[in-house]
């Protein structure tokens, strides 16, 4: 990896560490943090694939049915 490509990765790592510190300071449980990250990550991949679950599931490396179930769970928890 070249130095120029490692700088954005280092910045991302710093940002993630700062978020982790903030979440711990606020008393957020690991399960809550994990769920929020997954929901955000999956949602962004689906959005970038214009709602196409087949393409999004391929990008995520999970089966389309698994993605559909997770999306339904996210919606159910919002109610």
Image (tube, grey):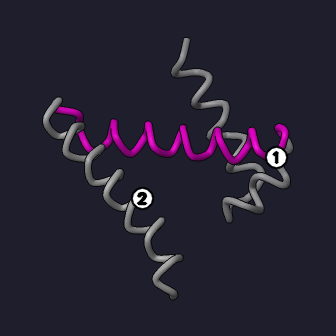
Counting from the top left corner in percent of width and height, residue 32 is at 33, 36
Counting from the top left corner in percent of width and height, residue 70 is at 62, 40
Front position in the image: 34 or 63: 34
Say which residue appears at 66% left-offset and 30% top-offset: 72
Describe residue 64's horizontal placement relative to residue 72 as left or right: right
Q: Is residue 62 magenta?
A: no
Counting from the top left corner in percent of width and height, residue 59 is at 73, 61
Describe residue 23's horizontal placement relative to residue 72 as left or right: left
The magenta segment is: 27-51
Counting from the top left corner in percent of width and height, residue 37 is at 45, 43
Mark linked to residue 69: none
Residue that sits furthest to the bottom in the current view: 1
Q: Is residue 10 above or below residue 20?
A: below
Q: Is residue 56 above or below residue 3?
A: above
The residue wearing badge 1 is 49
Q: Is residue 49 magenta?
A: yes
Front position in the image: 25 or 1: 1
Describe residue 54's horizontal placement relative to residue 74 as left or right: right
Picture quarter containing residue 30? Answer: top left
First-in-chain label (1 vs 2)? 2
Say which residue appears at 51% left-offset and 22% top-offset: 77
Residue that sits furthest to the front in the current view: 4
Q: Is residue 36 above or below residue 61?
A: above
Residues at marks 1 and 2, CA–CA distance in whole angstroms: 23 Å
Mark linked to residue 12: 2
Front position in the image: 14 or 21: 14
Q: Residues within 10 Å of mark 2 (few under 14, many from 20)?
A: few
């Amino acid at each position: 990896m070249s130095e120029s490509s490692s700088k954005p990765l280092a910045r991302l790592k710093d940002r993630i560490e700062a978020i982790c510190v903030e979440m711990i300071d606020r008393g957020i449980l690991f399960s809550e943090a994990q769920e929020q990250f997954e929901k955000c990550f999956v949602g962004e991949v689906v959005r970038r694939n214009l709602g196409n679950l087949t393409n999004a599931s391929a990008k995520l490396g999970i089966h389309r049915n698994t993605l559909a179930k997770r999306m339904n769970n996210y919606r159910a928890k919002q109610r």
